[in-house]
Image: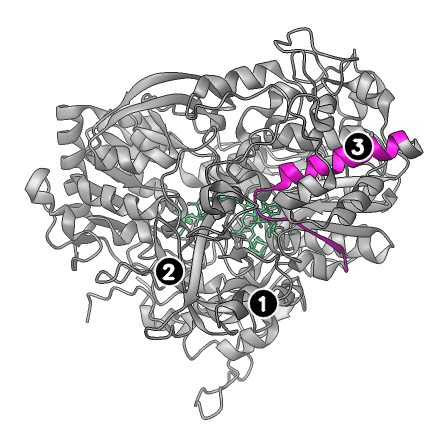
Amino acid sequence: MIQHEDLIFEGRLSRRAFVRGAGSIATLAAALAALGCAPETQLSPMPESGADHPPLSNPEEGGVWVSAACWHQCGGRCMNKVMVQDGVVIRQKTDDTHEDSFDYPQQRGCVRGRAQQQQCFGADRLRYPMKRKHWQPGGGENSRGDLRGKDEWERISWDEAISLMAQEMLRVKETYGCQAFYDKKPTAALKAFGGASTNWDTGSHGTYCLDTQLCGLPWINLGMANDRYDMLNADTIILWSANPAWSAAGLPAHIFQQVKEAGVRFIVVDPCYNATGQMLDAEWVPVRGGTDMALMMGVAYEMLRLDAEEGDVVDWDFLHTYTVGFDMKSMPDDKSVDENLRDYLLGAYDDIPKTPEWAAKRCGTPPEQITSLARELGMKNKVMILHNYAMARCHGTEMLPQMLLALGAMGGHMGKSGHACGTAYNTGAGMAGPALVNAGSTGLPPVPNPIDHVAPAAQVWGLIKNGGGPYRYVGDWLRLNMSPGRDEEYPEIHGIFHEITAQLQTGINMAEGIEAHRAVDFVFTRAQFLTTNALYSDIVLPVTTEWERIGGFGEYPNREVLLVYTQVVEPLYEAKTDQEIERLLLEALGMNPDDVYPLSEKQQFFNQLAGSTVVDADSETGVSPLLTITQADIDEWEVEGAPQEGAIGLAEFLKNGSYQIPRHADDEYGFIGYEDFIADPAAHPLSSASGKFEIYCQARADLLNSFQFDERVFKPYPVYYAPKLGYESTFKEGDIEGEKGDYPYLLFNPHYMGRSHSTYGNCPWLREAWRSPVFLNASDAAEKGVEDGDTVLLWTKDGKTLRSACVMETIIPGQVGLPHGAWVDIDEETGIDRGGADNYLIGNDLLGMGASGYNNCNCNFEKYDGESLVEDCLRPQRIVDLED
Ligand SMILES: Nc1nc2c(c(=O)[nH]1)N[C@H]1C(S)=C(S)[C@@H](COP(=O)(O)OP(=O)(O)OC[C@H]3O[C@@H](n4cnc5c(=O)[nH]c(N)nc54)[C@H](O)[C@@H]3O)O[C@H]1N2
Ligand SMILES: Nc1nc2c(c(=O)[nH]1)N[C@H]1C(S)=C(S)[C@@H](COP(=O)(O)OP(=O)(O)OC[C@H]3O[C@@H](n4cnc5c(=O)[nH]c(N)nc54)[C@H](O)[C@@H]3O)O[C@H]1N2
Ligand code: SF4
Ligand SMILES: [Mo]
């Protein structure tokens, strides 16, 4: 076993060297520094003043570069290489496999990728299985659930951990059935054992999860913007609720920079002048969180007015050929009401024309900017609307996907070069089109979850805490479709498993989640650190990082590259891989692990390699094998397989760490979203009932109305309504002309550069380089006597947290930004979190049709009169050391 002291970075790696390379202040502007910079980071000692670190004479002697995973849900996918010398990582670099150019860009990593070694070798890595001292199997009083999160830990052996877990799992299954297990994402072993109850959440894509394919958009609206070269053909790109400088770091953000340099104009529509806006010198159209529906309606109204007065703004031919429901001229056959969006905008049904002034009262955007956005979107301009989903992760935005679609269609901005209306999401931001190179599959058989209890996210912790109860089943978009609502009974949950996600930290309603954890018989978690899931558990199993595994492919690389990584070090301490853990558990449960995992991890990786393909116009299937694999390779790997011919040799691919397709402007890989449909709508119908874009969509309205979470009945076309939590509720009795209420500010949770959700939230380097403050508008702060750097108490009706203030002119007044994913740190006496955890402030409001609503919560803040916060990087990590 490798010893801790051999690996720990303190003393070997200079924190200052890292910070110098990465930029040191977590302001929005610092995002610029986070984009891929110099290809190599010097990690050999660079002594702090007064420190006594002996320099290595030749740090590279005997070192080997290895392709190292960067495996999180971080929005990018980049090359990461580390130099390993005697089992220790001494250097790190990103893609230098070829020169960087627009045609053949390097896949450069971001600041988080460079901190990855603190994930693998972190001082807070879990080293051995642990049991909570007062927990005993058997349920009831034995579990002392009230002590979860406060109890002491005991080191136990793997044998003891697995046998305790198996004993409890068998007991609960026998007594209550597997429905009494809860797991947000059950793994293959748990599903094979009988499955678990779970929950759904609108998560990443907000209301785009609510079956937008019924109105003709792709599933969760993915993939129908244009190839990156086509961005150069646009006059203007509107980044609507999108901040790729943070949320798609690595190549996508770099491509946007180059498109800007080529002369394309950018606009950002956002509550703050975000890092991308600053990077691209964009025009800022400010909008309050969760009020984009009002803004879009004001813009659409202005387009109609300008078209009537000046002509050539609205593309009526486009609307009447490719969409239904904009006006009475093209209504869908299945309509249930004779109403349409145009007449609604003009005020035909409620006597309220949706003028810029009407909109501005709600969204805060100056009316003249609403008019200029309308002009910009006119049919004569080459415009791309590229959106991300923050604006749809809001209460009251169920119909937002149809409203944005209507705006795009009014200007005819789909299916043509230089025009687009689609997403700028993660690695696909600005880079739409089918993948040109793909990994193969592992060959593992799929294992379905036999339990079909899926509660809404807002309700699940309450249901667990209260021993089950009635809920409305509506399916889960992750199974590709939601389902019509029906009444169900959520079972009494006896055991919680955390296997893959950071659910207690990243799911909403954390305070009630902690109570739910304290109410069950057992909580079993596997983790790399004492995550929030682990903190409130009974048995915690140490799991390896990707650096300690045989190898793999980062999920979701951009379309032009396939990245691969290989093992960096042997498993640290007593950590085991997820599959090793599951095999042990299956065996202890009296099952045959080979039924669930018939292939070794090595064979699975080999299968993925052998099955990798690259686009090939000459082949019948359109693809051919990526890799040349010889019999000698197969013998050396000791796996099953057959030799094959491909574009690159196995060893070369693994050493290089990627296979990338060089591009050029006129190559055959260009892509324009919806091009086929626009060329011939009858031959290429969309996924809606009419085969066209449905601005009026009966099927989607019927589905959403069947959920019945809300007494509201949705019209089948976009209509503005004030959600129970949103801008209107920051006023007394929701009266936006009246006085402000108890929670007068809108809270949103930007996905933060220094973290990937909660991942890296424990990383000291990143805590220092990307401090996690609360973003406040300067005049709001001044009104409360808060200055930059002051400790601020921030609260909602559901929780309280402390953060230091980052006071900015570049955030719309009334808006408060709390970065997503910071690790909670609750003072048990006061109940105040000192960690800045977003979900500690978000409650169990099941509003509208179940949108998680992170981005239009209501909050208040004041200067904190208690003890000031210390810098997060100086706060102790959650380290459990039972050896000494
Ligand atoms: N308030 C608020 N909440 C949000 C959001 C928001 O904007 N605001 N955003 C939401 C969104 S879009 C998303 S996608 C979710 C993300 O929610 P999660 O997927 O829960 O986010 P992560 O924090 O990345 O959690 C991944 C966990 O897996 C662990 N892990 C990493 N590698 C391995 C491994 O190999 N094996 C095992 N067993 N574990 C591993 C990590 O340590 C980490 O704890 O959060 C959502 N929550
Ligand atoms: N660094 C980093 N990158 C990530 C992640 C991460 O945790 N960290 N998570 C990844 C994942 S899984 C996801 S789902 C994506 C999420 O990516 P996005 O959906 O883009 O989410 P955010 O980055 O929170 O918000 C994007 C921009 O929208 C703005 N915004 C917030 N609310 C509103 C609103 O109501 N209206 C408008 N117009 N704008 C609004 C924010 O200020 C921000 O500038 O990011 C991915 N990339
Ligand atoms: S964007 Fe993601 S994959 Fe790329 S270096 Fe950063 S954390 Fe790693
Ligand atoms: Mo996400």
Q: Residue furthest front?
A: 738
Percent x, y for residue 484?
Answer: 45, 16
Percent x, y for residue 16?
Answer: 52, 79
Answer with mark 1 or mark 2, whichever residue precedes in sequence: 1
User: Which one is closest to the eye, mark 1 or mark 2?
Assistant: 1
Q: Label 1 amino acid?
A: Ala
- Density class for disc 3 (Cα within 10 Å; few <14, some 14-19, many ≥20) is many
Q: Decide which of 60, 306 is in the foreground and name it.
A: 306
Residue at mark 2: 801
Ligand 2 lies under 8 Å from the Cβ of mark 3: no
> Do residues under tags 3 and 2 come within 8 Å of each other at their CB atoms?
no
Real-space CA distance between mark 3 and mark 1, rounded to the nearest whole angstrom: 42 Å
The image shows residue 490, relative to residue 124, as above or below, that is above
> Magenta part of the protein: which range?
281-308
The number of callouts visible is 3
Q: Decide which of 534, 369 is in the foreground and name it.
A: 369
Regarding mark 3 in the picture, which secondary structure is present there? Answer: loop
Give residue 640's mark. none
Answer with mark 3 or mark 1, whichever residue precedes in sequence: 3
Real-space CA distance between mark 1 and mark 2, rounded to the nearest whole angstrom: 20 Å
Residue 179 in the figure: left or right of residue 567? left
Hey, which quadrant is residue 345 in on the image?
top right
Residue at mark 3: 672
Residue at mark 1: 778
User: Which one is closest to the eye, mark 3 or mark 1?
Assistant: 1
Percent x, y for residue 526?
Answer: 31, 47
Hey, which quadrant is residue 60 in on the image?
bottom right
Q: Is residue 638 visible?
A: no
Asked if residue 306 is among those painted magenta in the image, a careful observer would answer yes
